[in-house]
Image (tube, rainbow, N blue to C red):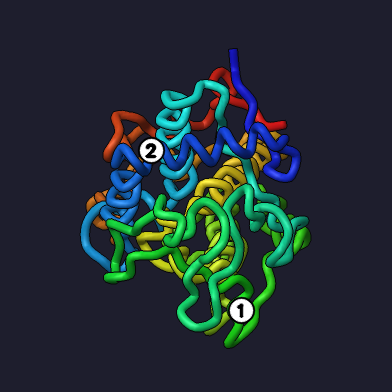
Amino acid sequence: MAYVRKDVSTLTGTERRRFVNALLELKRRGEYDEFVRQHIEYYTADGEDGLRTAHMAPSFLPWHRRFVLELERALRRVDSAVTVPYWDWTRDRTTTSVPWTKDLLGGNGRRSDRQVMTGPFAYSAGHWPIKEGVTDGRFLTRDLGRSAAPIALPTKSELKWALDDPVYDVRPWDSTVTRGFRNKLEGWGTGSGSVSWRNHNRVHRWVGGAMLGGASVNDPVFWLHHSFLDLQWYRWQRAHRSPRYLPADPPGPADPQHRRIASRHQKLPPWNVTPDGLEDMSRIYRYA
């Protein structure tokens, strides 16, 4: 029977505590840091050589769907009642709203070094030392809203702009495309500065700190963010019944994307699964 992923703002006190405790237990066991390492490994830009599956490619959504599911399975091995909630950043938009509460993810970083000082993931609480990253920092950092050059979270209309596109993705299947649901949601835009960051990318920038770059998994909000993105893929699928994951077939030898992206029936490393096999999760979980 499918279990339910809930809006984080609707969790009871007990559900919040169990979710946090399961994360802390994965961290204590060393399992959590494996997820950080994996995301760093697959954080490949479209300007680099080789296959890219996690970012700047059509498989952005199925890759992260499986990634979140793997974390969820690990959490449920600790506590079978736990699922990954989602953060609706079009509604809970302030630095003090859910999920930035002491009983969930804690709050913003302090001004001097952006170190998070409140909640269960604060370094001072002794539970969340950063062991894997792209810098030598040992503590969780945040800069909610980006104090030096403020930006706002994406709005409902900006999210709808992505959801309304009836095509999943288009050539050349990378960060430069201006049409297609995938990149409108992933958020690589034209121009420079904050206007070029949309939806998914803008949220990472808004949180700041550890959420910038390949080691963004070090902030537990990563999972709530990507659970919400996964919900948007589900909603897009429901709104556009006939379109599916694209490309359906691998780009040919003359195509610059040959062997650089995954088509519908090609395996997504590091798992033995295809985008086609990840399009329907209804037998595993559903959203409240």
Q: CA distance from mark 2 to mark 1?
A: 37 Å
- Report whether residue 47 is seen: yes
Q: Determine which of the numbered discs, if any, sits on residue 50 in the image.
A: none
- Quadrant holding the N terminus: top right
The amino acid pointed to by label 1 is: Val
- Can the viewer see residue 241? no
Residue 233 in the image: state x and y as whole percent.
60, 42
Snapshot quadrant of residue 119: bottom right
Question: Which mark is drawn over residue 195?
Answer: 1
Q: Residues within 10 Å of mark 1 (few under 14, many from 20)?
A: few
Q: Is 93 left or right of 141, judged from the image as shown? A: right
Tell me the amino acid under the disc marked 2: Leu
Where does the image place residue 30, in percent across and percent down from the top left?
Answer: 29, 42
Q: Quadrant of residue 132?
A: bottom left
Q: Nearer the viewer, mark 2 or mark 1?
A: 2
**Disc 2 on helix, strand or loop?**
helix
**Residue at (46% x, 40% y) in the render:** 23
Q: Image height check: is 139 above or below 34?
A: below
Residue sitting at x 27%, y 70%: 136
For marks 2 and 1 on the same chain, the one whose residue lies earlier in the sequence: 2
* Residue at the extreme bottom: 148
* 75 relative position to 200: left or right: left
Q: Tell whether label 1 touches label 2 (CB within 8 Å).
A: no
Label 1, secondary structure: give it: helix
Quarter of the image where one finds residue 280? top right
Q: Is residue 146 left or right of residue 45?
A: right
Neighbours of disc 2 within 10 Å: few (<14), some (14-19), many (20+) = some
- Is 180 placed left or right of 53 in the picture? right
Nearest the viewer among 10 and 255 is: 10
- Write the residue at 57% across / 23% down: 81
Location of mark 2 (residue): 26
